[in-house]
Image: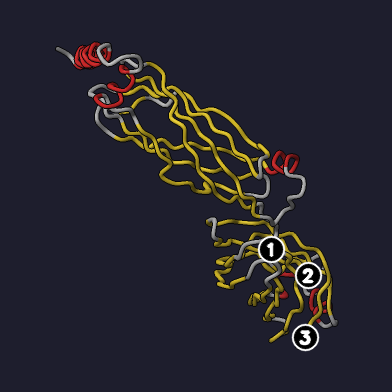
């Protein structure tokens, strides 16, 4: 007798006995003697995030109690916040779970912020949005047919805002024909409803029309949520000869216009983020 015949035999015996215990007995005895497959949400992680979208990964553990493989039909999902639905979809071609084993199924759900903000009109960049997720895993169980295993979980989704970044001043330490050195005092204000730790800044800095730096710097600075501020000191060294001797005249003044472009690598409660920086303004020089 093969595995499929074994399952069919168990089902026949169970339902036969059920006829002696009245209506509903078959379902009751099947529940007692033939286990149902189970599914649970093992975890949720923020897989990717930028200023346009975030991708959530739901890890679903599926257990197959049968002596034959359990085909997985599809996995539907719907996300809502405060009763307002903002995302739904379905994943298919999930394969199967081997006999008597447990398999983890990753589900990726991409949330586009433009769509989210259309539904949740009171939400602004920098907010943290609570959500409830309802999922349903449909399987093809032997002798039973299609079953949908419902799942629920809750979480929080960040809608990141770029921190305010401004060069407060540049403190020149050495200015001559061969080398210019100084410290760039960078003011950073966190506009998000969650704390963040700066781990690295990548930047290109231009003074006037001349680029004087294009590099990255590992720097650890913590910023509290909702307006937490801090100062990031960036060492600056360049050759006036390479940058153009005309820059020395600019540096002799009290300040200049600047452009700062790059990115901030951040550690947050939701995982790592990299947010862009592009600031054009004026700064002052100190000696």
Q: Position of residue 140 (x, y in %)?
A: 38, 19
Task: Give the residue at x 76% y 71%.
Answer: 244
Q: Earlier in the sequence, mark 3 or mark 1?
A: 1
Question: Looking at the image, do the residues carrying marks 3 and 1 touch, with CB atoms under 8 Å apart?
Answer: no
Q: Secondary structure at mark 1?
A: strand
Q: Which residue is mark 2?
A: 207
Mark 3–mark 1 Cα distance, whole angstroms, equals 21 Å
Contact, CB < 8 Å: mark 2 with mark 3? Answer: no
- First reached walking from the N terminus: tag 2 or tag 3: 2
At x 74%, y 52%, the residue is 124
Residue at horizontal 64%, vertical 54%?
Answer: 128
Going by the picture, which residue comes out furthest to the left? 1
Label 2: how many Cα within 10 Å (few below 14, some 14–19, many 20+): some
From the viewer's perspective, tell me whether residue 225 is left or right of residue 168: left
In the rendered structure, find residue 286 and report the number of the disc placed on it: 3
- For disc 1, the marked residue is 204
Viewer-side residue, 136 vs 11: 11
Where residue 43 sits in the image (x, y, percent)? Answer: 44, 46
- Look at the image and tell me in which quarter the C terminus lies: bottom right
Q: In front: 163, or 128?
A: 128
């Amino acid at each position: 007798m093969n595995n499929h015949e074994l399952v069919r035999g168990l089902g026949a015996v169970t339902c036969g006995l059920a006829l002696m215990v009245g209506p509903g007995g078959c379902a009751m005895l099947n529940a007692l003697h033939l286990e149902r497959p189970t599914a649970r949400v093992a975890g949720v992680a923020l897989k990717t995030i930028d200023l346009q979208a975030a991708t959530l990964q739901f890890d679903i553990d599926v257990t197959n109690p049968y002596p034959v493989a359990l085909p997985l039909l599809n996995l539907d999902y719907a996300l809502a916040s405060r009763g307002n639905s903002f995302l739904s979809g379905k994943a298919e071609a999930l394969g199967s779970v081997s006999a008597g084993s447990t398999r983890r199924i990753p589900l990726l759900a991409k949330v586009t912020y433009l769509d989210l903000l259309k539904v949740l009109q009171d939400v602004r960049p920098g907010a943290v949005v609570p959500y409830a997720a309802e999922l349903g895993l449909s399987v093809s169980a032997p002798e039973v047919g299609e079953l949908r295993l419902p799942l629920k979980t809750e979480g929080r989704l960040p809608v990141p805002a770029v921190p305010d970044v401004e060069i407060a001043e540049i403190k020149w330490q050495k200015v001559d024909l061969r080398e210019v050195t100084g410290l760039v005092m960078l003011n950073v204000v966190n506009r998000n409803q969650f704390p963040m730790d700066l781990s690295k800044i990548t930047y290109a800095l231009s003074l006037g029309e001349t680029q004087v730096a294009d590099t990255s710097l590992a720097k650890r600075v913590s910023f509290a949520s909702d307006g937490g501020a801090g100062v990031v000191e960036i060492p600056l060294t360049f050759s006036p000869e390479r940058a153009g001797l005309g820059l020395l005249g600019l540096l002799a003044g009290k300040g200049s216009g600047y452009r700062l472009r790059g990115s901030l690598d951040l550690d947050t409660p939701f995982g790592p983020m990299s947010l862009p920086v592009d600031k054009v303004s004026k700064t002052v020089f100190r000696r």
